[in-house]
Image: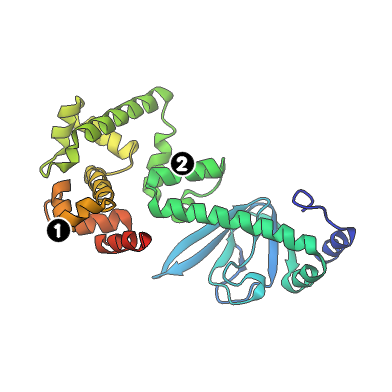
């Protein structure tokens, strides 16, 4: 706490008096869904994960390790029932303080309010960044985000938990991880082919060809169709159709933001011009890659301009 703000000796003594130390084993639940979390916890050693269930599927909402605070997000300070449960990923050592004690200290020590505000600001910035990358980033971008913000955790924590947190399939995350574990010369070759592909597709707008096929595109850029498939899977982490459709969708999104274009073209006309062969293919691809329908996206753009 002193690293954030000077702490009064009385506050230090109060914490020392009321702090509890506890240890929980890997797999042990710290608190459950639909119960009030009565404590705020500080991880001294180990790792915890927050989980919830949706349509009978377990979803990892966060993973916290040493020097992180943990409590119920939905029922902070014991204000409501928790919508998530927290379980130990590793054998974990914790410090805990009861919410009643913490609330009493808030009312008597201004510096604690300031410290807690700083802690919450950091947490919400991290949460916002994580939510953003999961919503708009592809699998590779999510992997790189997690590797950058949590160095060492990809080797330390179970892969299926990180995959759940990043909303990607474990097999996809494993494939991405392996691609970054390739020898340097193989990584450089993949990068070179990937950049060559990007340059060609951008310059020639190949995606606007309704009849584009992987073997024809490979021939045009001068590599085998097998090599192009490897580049798409291991460098871009996309299937051929998703790679092409991403270009089409991006082109349409840019067109939608141009008022002159939207005065003269319908969404369907833009879709056909971008390379989609049918309205249903366009709508399905847009919803898959953007997370909403084209009509909803267009409405959001219109609302932003008001």
Check disc 1: other Cα within 10 Å, few if <14, some if 14-19, many if 20+. few
Total residue callouts: 2
What whole-number distance in Å separates the C-alpha atoms at marks 2 and 1?
34 Å
Quick one: quadrant of the C terminus? bottom left
Scheme by which the image is coloured: rainbow
104 displayed left or right of 145: right
- What residue is rendered at 44% in x and 33% in y? 181
- What residue is rendered at 13% in x and 41% in y? 209
Vertical order, 60 against 188 (above or below): below
Q: Which residue is mark 2?
A: 144
Q: Name the residue furthest top.
A: 185
Q: Position of residue 50 (x, y in %)?
A: 55, 62
Depth check: 146 or 103 in front?
103
Q: Which residue is mark 1?
A: 279
95 displayed left or right of 75: right
Res 212 quadrant in image: top left
Which SS class for mark 2? Answer: helix
99 displayed left or right of 235: right
Q: Position of residue 226 (x, y in %)?
A: 21, 32
- What residue is rendered at 30% in x and 53% in y? 289
285 displayed left or right of 129: left
Depth check: 66 or 271 in front?
271
Q: Position of residue 242 (x, y in %)?
A: 25, 47
Residue 248 shows up from this direction = yes
Q: Position of residue 277 (x, y in %)?
A: 11, 51
Q: Earlier in the sequence, mark 2 or mark 1?
A: 2
Check disc 2: other Cα within 10 Å, few if <14, some if 14-19, many if 20+. some
Q: Nearer the viewer, mark 2 or mark 1?
A: 1
Residue 25 shows up from this direction = no
Q: Are marks 2 and 1 in contact (CB under 8 Å)?
A: no
Which SS class for mark 1? Answer: helix
Depth check: 251 or 233 in front?
251
């Amino acid at each position: 706490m002193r690293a954030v703000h000077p702490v009064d000796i009385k506050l230090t003594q109060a914490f020392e008096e009321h702090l509890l130390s506890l240890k929980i084993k890997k797999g042990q639940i710290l608190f459950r869904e639909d119960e009030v979390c009565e404590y705020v916890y500080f991880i001294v050693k180990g790792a915890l994960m927050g989980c919830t269930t949706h349509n009978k599927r377990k979803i990892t909402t966060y993973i916290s390790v040493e020097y992180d605070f943990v409590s119920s997000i939905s029922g902070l300070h014991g204000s409501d029932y928790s919508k998530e449960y927290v379980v130990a990923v590793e054998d974990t050592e914790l410090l805990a303080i009861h919410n009643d004690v913490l609330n009493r200290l808030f009312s008597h020590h201004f510096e604690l309010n300031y410290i807690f505000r700083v802690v919450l600001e950091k947490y919400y910035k991290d949460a916002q960044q994580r939510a953003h990358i999961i919503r708009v980033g592809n699998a590779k971008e999510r992997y790189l985000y997690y590797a950058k913000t949590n160095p060492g955790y990809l080797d330390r924590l179970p892969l299926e938990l990180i995959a759940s947190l990043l909303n990607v399939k474990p097999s996809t995350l494993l494939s991405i991880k392996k691609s970054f574990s390739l020898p340097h010369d193989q990584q450089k070759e993949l990068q070179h082919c990937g950049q060559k592909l990007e340059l060609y597709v951008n310059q020639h707008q190949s995606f606007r060809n309704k009849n584009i096929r992987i073997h024809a595109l490979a021939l045009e850029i001068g590599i085998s169709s097998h090599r192009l498939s490897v580049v798409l899977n291991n460098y871009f982490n996309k299937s051929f159709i998703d790679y092409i459709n991403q270009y089409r969708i991006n082109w349409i999104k840019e067109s939608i933001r141009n008022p002159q274009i939207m005065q003269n073209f319908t969404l369907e006309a833009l879709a056909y011009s971008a390379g989609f062969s049918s309205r249903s293919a366009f709508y399905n691809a847009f919803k898959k890659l953007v997370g909403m329908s084209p009509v909803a996206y267009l409405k959001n753009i219109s609302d932003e301009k008001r």
